[in-house]
Amino acid sequence: MATAHNVTAPKKNRLTLWILVAMVLGIGIGYWVHEQGSPTVIKGFSANIKLLSTIFIRLVQMIIAPLVFTTLVVGIAKLGDLKTVGRVGGKAILWFVTASLASLLLGLVLVNFFKPGQYISLTQQDTEGLKDLMTKQTSFSVQNFIEHVIPKSFIEAMANNEILQLVVFSIFFGVATASLGDYAKPLIKALEVASHIILKIVGYVMNFAPLGVFGAIAAVVASKGLEIFEFYIKYFAFFLIGIATLWIVLLTVGFIILKGRLRELLTRIGNPLLIAFSTTSSEAVFPKLTEELERFGCKDKIVAFVLPLGYSFNLDGSMMYMTFASIAIAQVYNVPIAHDIPMQLSMLLVLMLTSKGIAGVPRASLVVVLATCAMFNIPPIGVALILPIDHFCDMFRTATNVIGNALATSVVSKWEGELEEAK
């Protein structure tokens, strides 16, 4: 066992090093293109170089659905019965709801304290980006929410990578498999083998991570340039204070529950964190995070159940940003809600629900902010004001989402008495 660990450790460190090199190269080449190229050259370069990032993320998305299905069915079959599934699910939802409320509330407190809206200039709108977001927006309704959660077709849910719908089907399939006892054991064994094969593919796909990181960073720096920080420095700085505070809260609670093993967990998930940060995609690290949490000592059955749920219900960084961005836009236009705390609290509760209805939508935070603005008479065009800096905010939101879900899975494992020594 020790030999295998020694072989993989340098490999892992080498990948981290290549990702860091890719980030630096991406910033350097992107900035050079931004400074030297004509608008047409910049547009063409950004579109083409971003294909590297698209290839990497699509390769990861290719394995998410089969990984969720195989690991979750095997996990539930090993959990044994509906009672255990309910208990584990209840503990997970308790963590998710508490963490979501804390994140939303933190965003609300900080945006009222710092008032970042007064530093945003109305001249910096990105109306093109807003049009793109408008096409993704879906108005929140109970019907939309139910349709998003309950699958109409297992194949359709797999094809669209609808994690929450896959979880619902897999729970039914897993419980039914467990109820058949010995008769279903060959199928459980086959699905277990399939999940190991998919995790092997994860290792191959991760070799493309530096290329994906390079493409994502180079594209955004080439099109936006680093001057964007001059206009948004205060808004961005206040947002980073919020993210840092949220990390302190999450890690403190994590330390209280996990004790000295928290540091080990952070070391384990360092690589997925870096990939999530640089590609702004939580999905890009879902398979790798599954693997690292199992190595940390979380039981595969808990990881398989809690992590997919977390990806739909527990996006702490995005939650904090939703209240922060919505009220910041209200401050720019000086609409009543900017000064009305009871109305802001009602917005918080609305966000708690609406955010659950669109998991899996690209740049979901902004789509939710757009819908919320319309609901509370905040000019939706205001979203165009925060779009130019959003990619950089998204890097920190995504990394925070990953750490929130890693903590949730580890904490539920500990509560269940299923957290073993690291493998």
Image (spheres, rainbow, N blue to C red):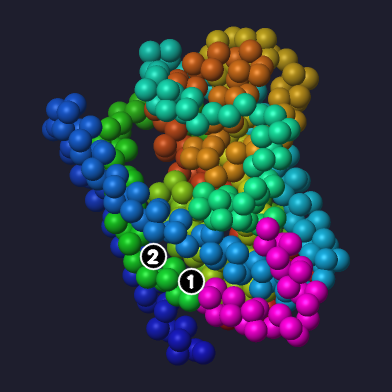
Q: Where is 283 relative to 385, above or below?
A: below
Q: Quadrant of residue 403?
A: bottom right
Reply yes or no: does residue 170 show up in magenta: yes
Nearest the eye: 21 or 179? 179
Reply yes or no: does residue 233 show up in magenta: no
Locate the C terminus and report the quarter of the image it occupies.
bottom right
Reading the image, the residue beneath label 1 is 198
Neighbour class for label 1 at 10 Å: few (<14), some, many (≥20)?
some
Q: Quadrant of residue 230?
A: top left
Residue 204 screen position, x and y as percent: 37, 70
Reading the image, the residue beneath label 2 is 206
Mark pair 2, 1: CA separation? 12 Å
Label 1: state its secondary structure.
helix
In the rendered structure, find residue 401 and report the number of the disc placed on it: none
In this view of the protein, can residue 133 be seen by the observer? yes
Residue 86 screen position, x and y as percent: 82, 61
Taking the spot 76% from the left edge, 68% from the top edge, the residue there is 175
Q: Quadrant of residue 15?
A: bottom left
The amino acid sitting under disc 2 is: Met
Magenta span of residues: 169-196
